Amino acid sequence: MSEYTYPFEPKTPYLTTDGIIEMYDGDSFLGIVLIARKNPPVGLALPGGFVDVGERVEDALVREMKEETSLDVQITGLLGVYSDPKRDPRFHTASVVYVARAEGTPKGGDDAKEAHIYTLDEIAFDKLVFDHADILRNYLKSRNEHHKQC
């Protein structure tokens, strides 16, 4: 950590991370994990949470996925950074969104009331909170482009 001290308290967005967990059974793709949130705003969401001071964003993603879904994930890529000041109705957050891979059965924990696997056709976009519908549309677009190239 730096020895520098600010002459004022910096005001910046809260840093968060969200994960699109692609679930597999061996080589078979099953779908992605969405959670039902315990706390407002309630609805479906990608699992995720806040990055702790002193924590790498990648480590926060792995930790949050374990806390909210009980899954051990392997990060496979970075989808993007989402920073619209209106993305979270509570306060300004900036989220680093990763795609990750896991196997097993998700179980809701921490801020997640439930965690379930959804096929890509089952995603209820109208029930997603925050900007997670936009994030998942971007994910589906990039996934489709990737599969066209293969």
Image (cartoon, rainbow, N blue to C red):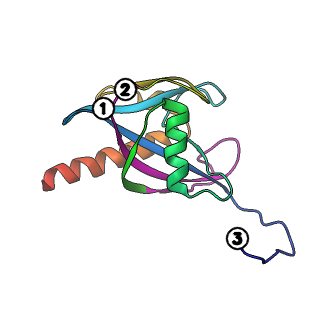
Q: Residues within 10 Å of mark 2 (few under 14, many from 20)?
A: some
Return the disc, 1 or 3, that comes first in the chain's sequence: 3
Task: Name the element at disc 1.
Answer: strand
**Residue 89 shown left or right of residue 127 in the figure:** right
Q: Residues within 10 Å of mark 1 (few under 14, many from 20)?
A: some
Q: Residues within 10 Å of mark 3 (few under 14, many from 20)?
A: few
Task: Name the element at disc 2.
Answer: strand
Q: Which residues are magenta?
A: 80-105
> Which amino acid, mark 3?
Met
Q: CA distance from mark 2 to mark 3?
A: 40 Å
The residue shown at (43%, 46%) is 135
Q: Nearer the viewer, mark 2 or mark 3?
A: 3
Q: Nearer the viewer, residue 110 or 93?
A: 110
Q: Which label was assigned to residue 1? A: 3
> Which amino acid, mark 1?
Gly
Do the CB atoms of the residues marked 1 and 3 lie less than 8 Å apart? no
> Which amino acid, mark 2?
Ile
Residue that numbered label 2 is attached to: 117
Task: Name the element at disc 3.
Answer: loop
Residue that numbered label 1 is attached to: 31
